[in-house]
Image (spheres, rainbow, N blue to C red):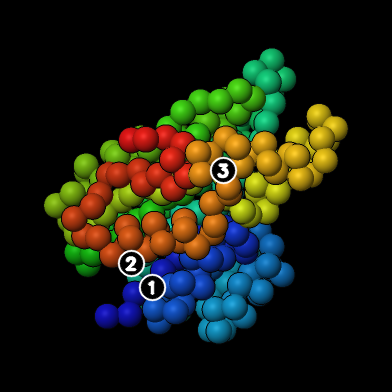
Amino acid sequence: MTRTCLVTGAGRGIGRGTAIALAGRGYRLVLTARSADELAETDALCGGGTLTIPADITDPGTPERIFTAAQDRFGPVGILVANAGTGMSASLAKTTDDDWQRMLEVNLTAPFRCVRRAVPAMVERGFGRIVVLGSVASRQGAPYIAAYAAAKHGVLGLVRSAAAELARTGVTVNAVCPGFVDTPMTQASVDTIVARTGRDPEQARAALEAQQPMRRLIEVDEVVRAILFCLDSPGITGQGINVDGGTVQA
């Protein structure tokens, strides 16, 4: 059976890599991200024929709009990869209420709304695969990322509770928790280090690589493989799959 797959944050990075991999399997794809231009590039890399919906995933009405459009075009969503997310770095004292709320909205509340919207049709059909992108920050705290880490810790709570509730329905819910991945998001971290410390970009990148025992950034394809593993594994649910070069041994 050809599944309908929704990937959020599909304009670049892990979301784009996931979309390309799913297109290679012949799935019907619904892709969303903020940038219409980036979505168009992803669509082209997928061979065309995807349903692209530029949208702000933090808008409370966005999930309903996307899932309804997917249903109308392809049928009910059977696979959800809730990948959209963003990060920030600030000391506790300089983390504003707006910073805190933004991290929760993008990284936790938006995935929750998508999962909530996806579940009824999946349960009705007796099949569903949900993967939410967590982070190494879902597993451990670090300086200057309190808001981001709190949101990503929450992702694991969402995934575990949803998996327990849905265990007998044919719907699995898992998280994939990457370390520093070679994506535009990590490049933004490099840029922040350069701006705040005066290091050159190579030094900043090396500092991030050094935080992972493998002493390199994770490749997008390595994260995508973990996502596909979750989709292909009906007996695995409620798990957080680390793809972090050995940073957290769980």
How far separated are the C-alphas under marks 2 and 1? 5 Å
Q: Nearer the viewer, mark 3 or mark 2?
A: 3
The residue positioned 28% from the left and 65% from the top of the image is 232
Dot label at residue 29: none
The relative height of residue 176 versus residue 231 in the rendered view (above or below) is above
Residue 218 image point, x, y percent: 54, 51
How far separated are the C-alphas under marks 3 and 1? 37 Å
**Which residue has dot 3 on it?**
215
- The part of the image, by quadrant, that contains residue 147 is top right
Amino acid carrying label 1: it is Thr
Q: Nearer the viewer, residue 42 or 70?
A: 42
Left or right: 202, with 223 as reference point: right
Pointers 3 and 1 in contact (C-beta within 8 Å): no
Residue 227 image point, x, y percent: 40, 58
Left or right: 246, with 46 as reference point: left
Dot label at residue 4: 1
Q: Nearer the viewer, residue 142 or 1?
A: 142
Mark 3 nearby-residue class (10 Å; few <14, some 14–19, many ≥20): some
The relative height of residue 222 versus residue 207 in the rendered view (above or below) is below
Element at label 2: loop
Amino acid carrying label 3: it is Arg
